Amino acid sequence: MSEPVILEICADSVESALAAEAGGAHRIELCSNLLEGGVTPSSGLIATVRDRTSVGLYVMIRPRGGDFCYSGDEFEAMEQDVLTAKQLGVDGTVFGVLNEDGQIDVQRTRHLVDLARPLKVTFHRAFDMSTDLRKALEDVIVAGVDRVLTSGGEQTAEDGIATLTKLINAANDRVAIMVGGGITKTNVRNIIARTAAREIHASVRIPVASPMRHRNERISMGAIKGREYERFVVLQDRVSHLLEAARNGAWRASGARSSRQDA
């Protein structure tokens, strides 16, 4: 029997990718620099994760943090990253491109989709930054993407439940709607039961202290002080607990639909 819910876990390391697979995730979204919302990982990281895992592997194609309106040079880098991901044997790519006015850049999106084929394509939460989500939905469908990752235009999916429900209904299986943004084992049941979502994206990472005994606290290599001695990793049990809760939510959603049909 096929899984009633597909769980995608965001990972930025080999360790996290392995934990995601061991916990039952169906797909991994591989990124780097999650403090910026995720950018394109190195070819070395992609190759290693591909070699060590067997579940679906989707790679973020994003040349920098910040907005999703890219210069010609940045877009050229995205093209090259798509080609590199294909060569490394991934299953899909993840990107999002907007115009200056906040609408989906259909032409550039379609170009990247065509370049990525036969890989699958997810349009990421740049979608949530667009001016009109309903129009954006039609635009990404025209552009040919396979899936949209969205929180319903809110900070979290829980806050965007009403809009997510409308988007899933409007999509009508023309494109998959993957729900993400603040998904936890506590709220996923309610989110799935109310939206009837069948794909969930989550980042179940926890902070882990560095094993280094020698520390120079006077120096910070990045914008956030102290990050040299802390990193975030995915834990296998958190993935499995989230998946179990998601399945329970899907069961509740199916039961509710059956009750309405029988009434």
Image: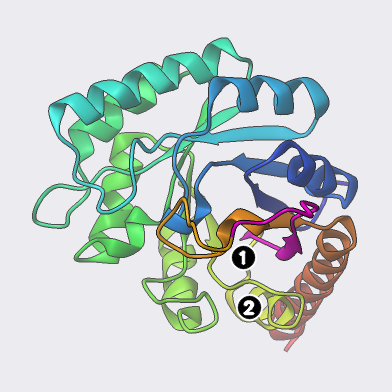
Using the rendered view, name the quadrant where residue 191 is placed: bottom right
Q: Is residue 71 left or right of residue 237?
A: left
- Residue 63, percent from left and from top: 34, 35
Image: 211 above or below 27: below
Which residue is labeled 1 in the image?
Answer: 197
Image: 30 above or below 246: above
Instruction: Verify whether residue 212 appears in magenta.
Output: yes
Instruction: Give how far apart the Cα atoms at labels 2 and 1 are.
Output: 8 Å
Kindly tell me whether residue 118 is visible in this rendering.
no
**Crowding at mark 2 (Cα within 10 Å: few <14, some 14-19, many 20+):** many
- Residue 246, percent from left and from top: 77, 69
Image: 171 above or below 113: below
Q: Residue at x 51, y 62 (%)?
A: 218
Q: Residue at x 42, y 71 (%)?
A: 152
Query: Which span is picked out in magenta?
Result: 199-216
Q: Secondary structure at mark 2?
A: helix
Dot 2 or dot 1: first in sequence order is 2
Q: Is residue 98 left or right of residue 209?
A: left
Q: Residue at x 56, y 64 (%)?
A: 226
Q: Nearer the viewer, residue 5 or 224?
A: 224
The image's colouring method is: rainbow
Cβ–Cβ under 8 Å for marks 2 and 1? yes
**Crowding at mark 1 (Cα within 10 Å: few <14, some 14-19, many 20+):** many
Which residue is labeled 2 in the image?
Answer: 191
Q: Amino acid at mark 1?
A: Ala
- Residue 175, percent from left and from top: 47, 47
